[in-house]
Image (cartoon, grey):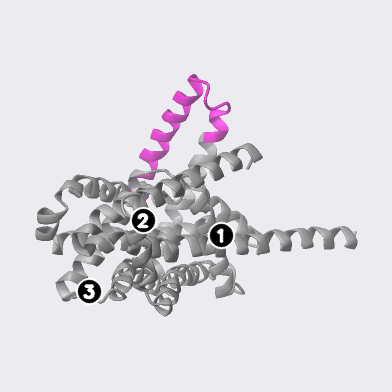
Amino acid sequence: MPIKKNVLNALLLIALITFALWFALHDDYQQVIENIKAIPIWLVFIVCGLGITYYLLQGYVISQCAKIYKKDIRVIDGIQNAYVAAFFNGVTPVGGGQVAQSFALKQIGMKIPDIASTLWMDFFMFQIVVIIYAALMLLFNLEFVFGNIMLYFPFIIAGWLINSAVIVALWLMTKFPNFFIKLTTKIINLLHKIRIIKEPEETAKKWKLSLEYFHSEIIKLKTRKKLLVKGILCNIIRMTIFYSIPYVIALGYNMPFDAIDVLHIIAISSFVHMLNALTPLPGDTGFTETMFILMYAVVFHDYAKPIMIIWRLATYYINIIIGACVLFYFRIKGAKAKSDDIYQQ
């Protein structure tokens, strides 16, 4: 990535973090800070541990998907890969994570087609769980949504539709591969006419091969029932932990919650996740914090702001730092490998 683009991304991220903190603190920063101090430090460590567990589970699923193609892959390799994705998804707009994941898997000796298949399986199982989870939360909390956060309902639906559209599009590609090959060929030719694509025939050929490969991998995945069950169960646990973090933080304030309140809290967390589909910002920074405060004010009231800051620390900042350390490790490892190659020549 060019230095200029890195600098622009860093400046954008700093600006978004500044806005998020301003939004959380500008009215009553002293009270917010006092509320943050009131949380027991041991609870902050537990919450950060839950945020880390989210990526540990993702890493486990990645390692199980990759094991089909590379028998000696370790769970730690999958965890490192998950953190590489966490870092790049957190600091770059749309899609930076998967490119970095591909590079990291290539570093441990996986082939490009196998990497594509591994990341696709991980994404598919994750996305299925996310959209079904959000749909169930919406279904079981309709009265609460209409009575308290109706203003955000159209945006929640829009976010859910965007997330669902990805899975639907993938499913349609497997059902009608020839149609999509013809469609993409026409699109590629159109882009060639307006001088966006230089070599339409080569691009169309690569896209055709990708679709055929994708179609064959879908068929294979249907036969890997054990992996499917394991991956989906891990992702259910993963998302339940992630969506429950605001509730765990709120326990530090001794708020009186009953079972239905807990369900509402988990539901709002899944809705905030759906809303993130509406923004291409790095790590959804600024937007996520704002929506968290606005929506959780219904149940957390004055504590929504301090809970957001601790939640964001556990689910974003800590993991960005860990991801940066993992990336640094990969760079040192890569530099050492090049050095060894030179001495061996």
139 displayed left or right of 245: left
Marks 2/3 in contact by CB < 8 Å: the verdict is: no
Of 315 and 156, which appears nearest the observer?
315
Q: Is residue 316 magenta?
A: no
> Which quadrant of the rendered structure holds the C terminus?
bottom right
Which of discs 1 and 2 lies nearer the camera? The answer is 2
Residue 157 location in percent, x, y? 22, 48
- Magenta region: 174-203
Label 3, residues with CA under 10 Å away: few <14, some 14-19, many ≥20: few
Q: Main secondary structure of the magenta part?
A: helix
For label 1, the residue is 84
Numbered mark located on residue 255 in the image:
3
For label 2, the residue is 29
Residue 165 location in percent, x, y? 30, 47
Residue 199 location in percent, x, y? 58, 28
Q: Mark 2 and mark 3: span between their CA atoms?
A: 21 Å
Which of discs 1 and 3 lies nearer the camera? The answer is 3
Q: Mark 1 and mark 2: span between their CA atoms?
A: 34 Å
> Which quadrant of the rendered structure holds the N terminus?
top right
Q: How many marks?
A: 3
> At label 1, which amino acid type do we have?
Val
Q: Is residue 105 visible?
A: no
> At label 3, which amino acid type do we have?
Met
Q: Which callout, 1 or 3, points at the residue further toward the start of the chain?
A: 1
Q: Which callout, 2 or 3, points at the residue further toward the start of the chain?
A: 2
Could you tell me which residue is drawn at 60 percent across and 43 percent down?
Answer: 6
Q: Is residue 195 magenta?
A: yes
